[in-house]
Structures are given as structure tokens and as C-alpha cells.
Image: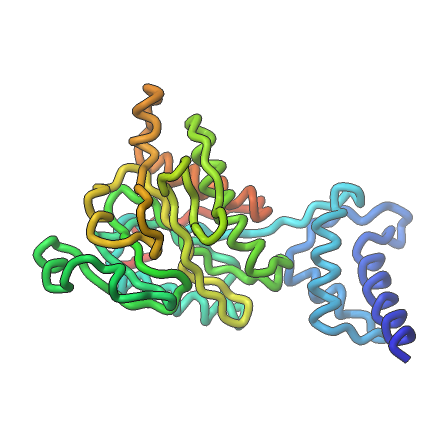
Amino acid sequence: MFVLHLQISLKKVILSFLSLISFSKFGKRNKTPFSLDQTYRLIGCNRHIKLTRFHKIFVISLLQIHSPVCGMRIPRKLEVWRLGTVNYLKALKLQEKLASDRKINKISDTLLSLQHPPTYTLGKRRTDYNLLVPESELKTMGAELHYTQRGGDITFHGPHQAVLYPIISLRDIGLGARKYVENLESTMIDLSSLYGVKAHGQRKCETGVWVGDRKIGAIGVRISSGITSHGLAYNIDPDLTFFKHIVPCGIADKDVTSLRRETRQTDMVLPDEEVVQDQLVTCFARLFGYNDIIWKDKNDLEIDG
């Protein structure tokens, strides 16, 4: 019985895949670039075979892998919102709204590209002793403190640090949580390599992105019903003294660095900060397979900082 069920499931997957790459009725290979929504409709249109969500996602993943062989190219759209500097709580509220909209397919995958005023945030793995100063002292430093539902411990956000918050459907692109985090790491590693900085991802329990024993990028994500929020923070040239008041991400005895500090040793001249942040977005889009990027600026979106 199990073998029969497996054969039927396999048949559904194969038939669905073939329906997407089949020749048209005129004898020519179908090269129409399908969007994800179009793909879902096409897969589900066969009245004789009922397909589960698993089959649809599996077929989409196969198609993305084999599309060059089939002569097809599926455009994967990503809206990138350049928001400038945004208060942390306002950015959090925006993420929650977008994640809710993405869950019901009201919007497509969206990436928030921004910076924050000086802010300390604690994730779900937080421990109070990783904040090394009283909360009252943070206020005198002009920094805020917020508790969040993202993964990870404590970190710092501030000016001259690039922050990306992806609001994307992992189910639609066929990624699991671990691969998603690895891609976020690779996003920062790839950007670093553009400037001759050799970075690497986490080793053992040391999360984030590192240059030797110095941390240059942090990751803290939340995934709910397959929809992501929160994301990554990459140090372009922030005031690193803010990190002295915490144990970043709960990892003791490790230094924090920045792209500016690392390139200073090689006399590499960095372009404007906005250029570097856009390059980080480009690295993200390439790694996640987005080839249709729609850029939107803060003024177009009418979002207050």
C-alpha cells in the first residue's frame, strides 16, 4: 500500500513537471516565463489529478533547477524598499504588516533595506547578563532597547550599518530554515569579497559572519508559517564602541569589526554607503534567485522614519 501511494505521488510530481515544460500544441517548446502565481494555476488546472501543496512546491523547486535545460526562465520578483534610517519599532510594525500580507499572497516577496538609530535588540535566546550596562545608562547614550521575537541573543543596530529585512515565502522558493540562514550568511560573505575581505560563516556555535575572529555581520530571523521577517545586519562603518556595552549575540571574548576597518588595512577606498548597501541587496537577490528587482524609495512609499 505504501509503495502504491509512493508511485501515485511520484506520478503526480512527474506529470506536473512535464505539464510545465511540455511542447505547445504547435509543436514548439513553451518558453513562456511563468510567475509563481501562474505556475500554481498551471499545476492546479489538471482536473484529473488533484495536487497537494507539497506537489506544487516540489515541482516549482524542480523547475527552478532544470529551467535552463528546458529553455525556460521563471522570473522571481522582489520588491526592494530603500527606507533610509527608520526607528526600530516603526520598522518592526512595518515588518509585521508586510508578513501578514505576504502570508495571504496580498504582496510579493519584499526586502526592506534600511538603517536604524542606535538601538539594542534582544532575541528569544536572550540572557540579561549579556547587557553589560544598566538600561538607564543606554538612554544617556542615546540608544534604545527592545525585546523581540527573532532568534538569537543581543545585538546592536546603528548608523552606518546595513540592515536587510526579507519578507519572503520560503515555501514558494523551496528553502528550509537552515538553507535560508546559510544564504543570508553568504550574502554578507559575497559583499565582503567584493572589497577583498575574506569572511566566513558560523563555526560551531558562533553565529553570524566573521573575518577571522572578528564579527562583521549578525543574523537573527523569525519564520512564521513559512514567511520570514527580521534578517541580517552588516557593519559598513558603525561606531563600534556601542558593541562594548554588550556581549554581541551572546558570544564572549570576540571582537567586532566593520568593512571600513578591514579595508583600511588594504588601502581599499569604499564608495558611498548607499552604494555598498545596494550591493548587499544585489548579493541577496542573486543568491536567492531573484531576477526581477523592483526598487522603491522611501518617498514613493510615504513611510515616516
> Which residue is more in the foreground, 190 or 210?
210
Residue 291 lies, in percent from the top left, at 58, 44
The quadrant where residue 146 appears? bottom left
Indicate the position of residue 17 as horizontal and vertical percent values.
Answer: 81, 58
Q: Residue furthest top?
A: 267
Q: Which residue does the image show at 27% across and 64% down from the upper left? A: 89
In the image, taking residue 122 as reference, residue 15 lies left or right, namely right
Give residue 163's position: percent from left, percent from top: 36, 49
Residue sitting at 34 percent across and 45 percent down?
Answer: 162
For image coordinates 74% across by 74% down, the residue present is 52
Q: Nearer the viewer, residue 256 or 298?
A: 256
**Whole-percent x, y for residue 99 in the image:** 45, 67
Give the image's coloring scheme: rainbow
Report the side of 186 relative to 67 (left or right): left
In this rendering, the answer to whether 225 lies above or below 66 is below
Quadrant where the C terminus lies? Answer: bottom left
Residue 100 shown left or right of residue 115 in the figure = right
Hey, which residue is sitting farthest left in the picture?
A: 140
- Looking at the image, the residue that sits furthest to the bottom is 1
Q: Is residue 274 above or below residue 134?
A: above
